[in-house]
Amino acid sequence: MSAALEARLGQPWKKPPFISSPGLRWALLIGGVIYLILAIYSIDVNWARVYRGLDRGWQFVIAFANPDFTSRAGEIKSGMIESAVMAFASTVVGIGISIPIGLGAARNISILPVYLVCRSIIALSRALNEIVVAILLVAIFGFGPLAGFLTLSFATIGFLSKLLAEEIEDMDRIQAEAVRSTGASWLQRYTYGIHPQVVPRLIGLSIYRLDINFRESAVLGIVGAGGIGATLNTAFDRYEFDTAAAILLMIIVTVMALEYLSGIIRARVQ
Amino acid sequence: MAISNVDGQKVWQRRDRNTQFKIWFAWFIGTAVFMWCWQQISAATTWQFFWDAPRIAADIGGRAVPPRWSYMDKLWEPLWDTLNIATLGTVLALMMAVPVAFMAARNTTPSALFVRPIALLIIVSTRSINSLIWALLLVKILGPGVFAGLVAISIRSIGFCAKLLYEAIEEIDETQVEAITATGASRWQVMAYGIVPQVLPAFAGIAVFRWDINLRESTVLGLVGAGGIGLQLQGSLNTLAWPQVSLILLVILFAVVVSEWVSAKVRGAII
């Protein structure tokens, strides 16, 4: 110890590197640089087109300063209502399906076959992108909010069940045990032993998911699954940047309001 | 805890009457709103298509199997583009997110009154708009192609990365910063030796986490013309080439699973 200290005295100190093994550090660095060169080289940017587009970009920035809510008010209104409807309905249905799947996916209260089935449903729902699901469902069910509603419900399952299952796995066993020792049936054990422990988190997550579903419902319209996205897409296609800016502002304000609201509610229940 | 008297016997109930009524009322409102929502969706749906759906699904499924494996030759390049959009987009986003995060964190912001609200505004506005919408806009401005997708991904990621990063900065151990300050270090030296080493693991974790999300998102950006494998998906869907669609979906699924695995491994190694 003291010998090591003697040797280091008088030497300048150097910050220890983030990755301690020098081989790995250099390999990562050189690999990263080679990748970046290859990647940047493979992207060809049409700078002339970008330069011409800047003018349009500037128009869009100006449009944000005076958004046009009025000239397409009817379409914006019906689009926003449709988005909100889809978000709410899919959250409700998603919660309804998520609770049994979440229970099945919690290792401490379910049996292995059920656990595996529920976990694979969750994995499938999480691996598939919402847009991809929406495309398939639009192809199957036709255009309209039903496809969007089903897509969002499906996406909600993966999110809520996984977090609910983790919450149940982390719960206090003693309370469930106490209820069980009174001779409670399986359903009674759930209602009095498990449910009260997870319900604050479940409410918080549901509101958070409502927020996410609203945000997602804004893009589903691009592939024809209903909601404000269709109106937005049309506005961009017609180069009506002022209408598009109005829609974007409304989305931002709604999302911020929802986020604020969910923050308050989550703080109250938790 | 509520105890009611029934025939002189005390009976335990979970809630008292008022709470129970409030809960029932909330359920009533919730159910009514849901029914109304369902009516709206139902009114906008052609139910004929719905009942026809199993047949159509079986039809599409039948056409989509087996996937057209030979089409894979044409997918390597879009896949490379998709990877580039995700990676370069994340790199670009982090470059912009780091200063924003330092401006937004209460303990490092140059001015809590003027700079911090601007930084928070940037975070909120970039976070609440989906990357597909950014792509839609940027395709109009920058022209279709990989570049628009890359910029869309990076703008969308600024808010996410900056938010997580500034929360990490606010949670640092102040005593270390004080120790560095006590040696007479300048503002930048405090930053480099007191703050950065503490948030570096969080930074690396956020970067890999966001990269994983970005790879998912960049697979569909092509639908609006912003490059990547989504472009091929759009083309195959438009020509109803279902064997190609199923192959592309398999490739996307595979890419997502691989990226999740990589991100979990790297985060496991860091934390």
Image: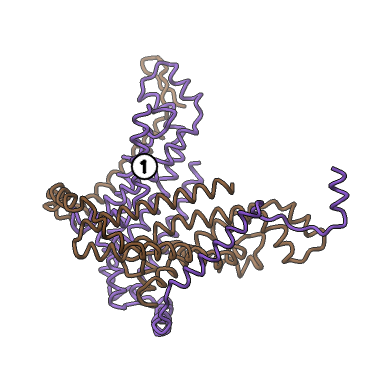
Q: Which chain is purple?
A: A
Give the image quarter of residue B247: bottom left
Q: Residue B148 in the image: state x and y as whole percent.
A: 40, 72
Give the image quarter of residue A251: bottom left
Q: Amino acid at mark 1?
A: Ile
Q: Residue B129 in the image: state x and y as whole percent.
A: 41, 64
Circle 1 residues within 10 Å: few <14, some 14–19, many ≥20: many
Judge by depth and name the residue closer to the eye, B74 or A46.
B74
Residue A137 visible (yes or no) = yes
Q: Chain of mark 1?
A: A
Judge by depth and name the residue closer to the eye, B39 or B207.
B207
Residue B121 visible (yes or no) = no
Judge by depth and name the residue closer to the eye, B104 or A66.
B104
Judge by depth and name the residue closer to the eye, A125 or B85.
B85
Q: What residue did someone put label 1 on?
A: A122
**How many numbered callouts?**
1
Q: Residue B266 in the image: state x and y as whole percent.
A: 53, 50
Decide: is B229 above or below A172: below
Q: Name the residue: 39% across, 35% down.
A: A105
Give the image quarter of residue A31: bottom right
Q: Is residue A11 left or right of residue B160?
A: right
Q: Residue A245 in the image: state x and y as whole percent.
A: 38, 73
Scheme by which the image is coloured: by chain
Q: Name the residue: 42% across, 36% down.
A: A165
Q: Secondary structure at mark 1?
A: helix
Chain B color in figure = brown
